[in-house]
Image: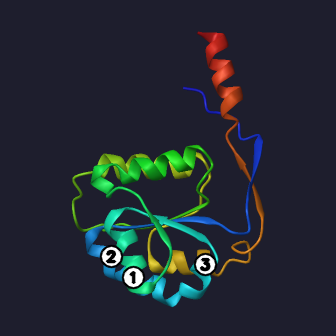
């Protein structure tokens, strides 16, 4: 299988669109982390899966767009935002000790983030680095796959 060339630039805006996701065993850890970064997070557009979004809104008073719960399709909703270039950062505190019934969905979400060059933080330390980056509050130019060229080349060859 050929890989799409990374030839297209994408600008992440200064006001980032950030997904906040956590497995059940990591929700409290995400709440504590988000509480420390509340003043930074409030300047960005936030979204999250089911319970996580509701808890962030209720507990911290943050405006968080709620999607479906992960096992009910929320992971795919976030994946769709990634492919449409409507998500800029993914903070996903996943639990390495608990088997998840929707592991294939999680793997697909992380695959899309890697494919589309979306920064991902999987724990408080990596999320701290992401939030303290000088790029967080300014436009950031990055390279993403040239999906249109890739589709054209495949349709021309088939």
x then y, percent, for residue 8 = 76, 42
Q: Which mark is residue 31?
A: 1
Mark 3 lies on residue: 131
Q: Quick check: 23 above or below 127?
A: above
Name the residue located 35 percent from the left edge and 66 percent from the top edge: 94
x then y, percent, for residue 65 = 47, 64
Alpha carbon of mark 2 to alpha carbon of mark 1: how far? 6 Å
Mark 2 lies on residue: 27
For the N terminus, the image quarter is top right
Q: What element carries label 2?
A: helix
CB contact under 8 Å: marks 3 and 2 = no
Q: What element carries label 3?
A: helix
x then y, percent, for residue 127 = 53, 76
CB contact under 8 Å: marks 2 and 1 = yes
CB contact under 8 Å: marks 1 and 3 = no
Query: Which of the marked residues, 3 or 2, is nearer the chain's N terminus?
Result: 2
Name the residue located 61 percent from the left edge and 32 percent from the top edge: 3
Count residues near mark 1 (Cα–Cα under 10 Å), then give few for <14, some for 14-19, many for 20+.
some
């Amino acid at each position: 299988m050929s890989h799409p060339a990374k030839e297209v630039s994408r600008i992440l805006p200064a006001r980032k669109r950030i997904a906040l996701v956590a497995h059940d065993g990591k929700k409290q850890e995400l709440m504590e982390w988000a509480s420390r970064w509340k003043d930074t997070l409030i300047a960005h557009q936030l979204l999250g899966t089911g319970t996580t979004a509701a808890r962030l809104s209720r507990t911290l008073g943050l405006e968080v767009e709620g999607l479906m719960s992960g096992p009910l399709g929320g992971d795919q909703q976030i994946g769709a935002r990634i492919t449409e270039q409507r998500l800029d950062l993914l903070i996903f505190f996943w639990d390495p000790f608990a088997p998840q019934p929707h592991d294939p969905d999680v793997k697909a979400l992380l695959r899309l983030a890697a494919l589309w060059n979306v920064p991902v933080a999987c724990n408080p330390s990596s999320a701290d680095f992401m939030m303290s980056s000088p790029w967080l509050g300014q436009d950031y130019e990055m390279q993403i796959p040239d999906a249109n060229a890739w589709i054209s080349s495949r349709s021309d060859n088939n």
